[in-house]
Image: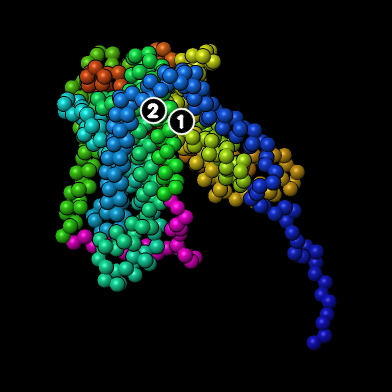
Amino acid sequence: MPATDVAVPAQIRPHRLPHRVRPYRAGGRLPLLLVVPSLVTAVVAVVPLVYLGIRTAQAGASEVADVLFQRSTGELVLRSLTMALVVTVACTALGVAVAWLVVRTDMPGHGFFGVVAALPLAVPTYVAGYAWISALPRFSGFPAAATVLTLCSYPYVYLPVAAALRRLDPAAEEASRSLGAGPGRTFLRVSLRQLRPAIASGALLVALYVLSDFGAVSLLRFDSFTRVIFTAFNLGFDRTTALVLATVLIAITAAIVLAEGLSRGRARYARVGSGTARAARRVRLGATKAPAVAFLLALAALALGVPAGSLGYWMARGASRPTSLADVGAAAGASLWVSLLGALLTIVLAVPVGLLAGRHRGPVPFVLERATWLSHALPGLVIGLSLVFLGINVATELYQTTAMLALAYAVLFLPLAVGAVRSAAVQSPPALEDVAKSTGRGSLHVLATITLPLTGPGIGVAAVLTFLTCMKELPATLLLRPTGLDTLATELWTYTGVAAYGAAAPYAALLVLLSAVPTYLLGRRWGAIGATGGAR
């Protein structure tokens, strides 16, 4: 047939969109609307550490050397690293075992145990320490601190490993089983290798959490870095020792983070091929089913039952002062107020960085995002100590104000908020923003009407997580709270320090209650709790 020309109406002719959405590459144009506030956030995150380094250098080389090369400093390093190693190994073993039983076996009640295994994150270590020492007055020292930290920290390994097991394609495991390998050998030789990134990330969180813990080691009378630093500054007024030990702790945590990054190597663990991974067939436990259930019940009893039983006992005995209920209400109000301020400031600082990192690529977004993560490897005591020195010598008007305390919360918990906002920004479609810009809308209008509503769920999750974490923060609050401001955490720490367990019980119970309910709801609705860390 001869070729004929067919007229195509213009309305249905193929056309190009006015702009093609491309991720940012080096040399592209970054939106100043996000870059400028992100620079402010990076400065806020870094300034306390820079000031701490300057003050340490001003102490003089001889004084720094005297503290650094003392025998007690070497013993302190050895004790702290030993505690971190023991707790990390124990948490890794418990977390992997619990995750495998809950996700991959036919154990009865796996849904119930899956939720219960995550709930210890809602129990601050100082509440757990208070519960154990009030029940067993001689429970102290290295074994006691290691036990409490393990029971409170193993969910940091359990959550990411359980999530990885659910996403794991069972093809390799089935191939191993078809070749005659049993469930145990298949898990050790096949599954465990694929779980290495999740296990490594969880173990890193545990190690950093142990090094940064202050409440449990103080109540259980174990001399770690945080307890010695706090004592040197708050009780002995030995600022040089506190500065040098804080710097040593920063170096140790940075070395651990670097070592974990180098240990990843270039191995890839992604599944080859497309499509959705099939659900794995659950392993039949057979005769070991009863011991497995008994193991999980015993773990829940130690991690949750002991704190609940101790709190119930002391609550039944009543508070030691007639005005305790009014005091608890005042402390709860103060906790809610300062936590709200801290969460608001954290979100204001985190949103630009999260949007910039989620919407653009290149060295500038990468560096600005990583700057906010510097505080992730540092304990609240070090951040609080640096802000104390900053407030005494530079920002005197902010010292011992709620604004300074809110700033400490923001520096400490920026990674939580930035990670949640960035995840939401990556998952939200940029096409609507591109269309809005093509119609002549300004960047500020697009940000307010398109970008922020699209990332609203992530911002909401970041706000809730930050608020809850601020509620439970202890060392920075002790150092920076205004005179006369008592929170649930500080009141609990004060009363347990003098063995007034009846007076401490209402504060501990309310703090756990305020933390447990949102933790449960977030754990059911959002599966990334394990990836964002936890509370200090």
Q: Position of residue 158 (x, y in %)?
A: 33, 47
Taking the view exactly as shown, the residue that stands out farthest to the front is: 62
- Kindly tell me whether residue 386 is visible in this rendering: yes
> In the rendered view, does 182 fall on the left or right side of 434?
left
**Element at badge 1?**
helix
Tag 2 near tag 1, CB within 8 Å? yes
Q: Position of residue 247 (x, y in %)?
A: 43, 27
> What secondary structure prevails in the magenta region?
loop
Residue type, label 2: Glu
Residue range corresponding to the magenta coloring: 264-286
Q: Position of residue 329 (x, y in %)?
A: 35, 20
Q: Nearer the viewer, residue 386 or 333?
A: 386
Distance from label 2 to label 1 (Cα)?
A: 10 Å
Question: What residue is shown at x 27% (from left), y 51% (from top)?
Answer: 97
**Element at badge 2?**
loop
- Asked if residue 266 is among those painted magenta in the image, a careful observer would answer yes
* Front: mark 2 or 1: 1
Question: What residue is shown at x 42% (from left), y 21% (from top)?
Answer: 64
Label placed on residue 135: none
Query: Which residue is under mark 2?
Result: 473
Q: For the N terminus, which image quadrant?
A: bottom right
Query: Which residue is under mark 1?
Result: 412
Question: What residue is shown at x 21% (from left), y 40% (from top)?
Answer: 301
Give the image quarter of residue 75.
Answer: top left
> In the rendered view, does 106 fall on the left or right side of 240?
left
- Asked if residue 354 is among those painted magenta in the image, a careful observer would answer no
Q: Position of residue 17 (x, y in %)?
A: 73, 56
Q: Nearer the viewer, residue 188 or 496?
A: 188
- Kindly tell me whether residue 520 is visible in this rendering: no
Q: Nearer the viewer, residue 16 or 302?
A: 302
Judge whether 271 appears above or below 483 on screen: below
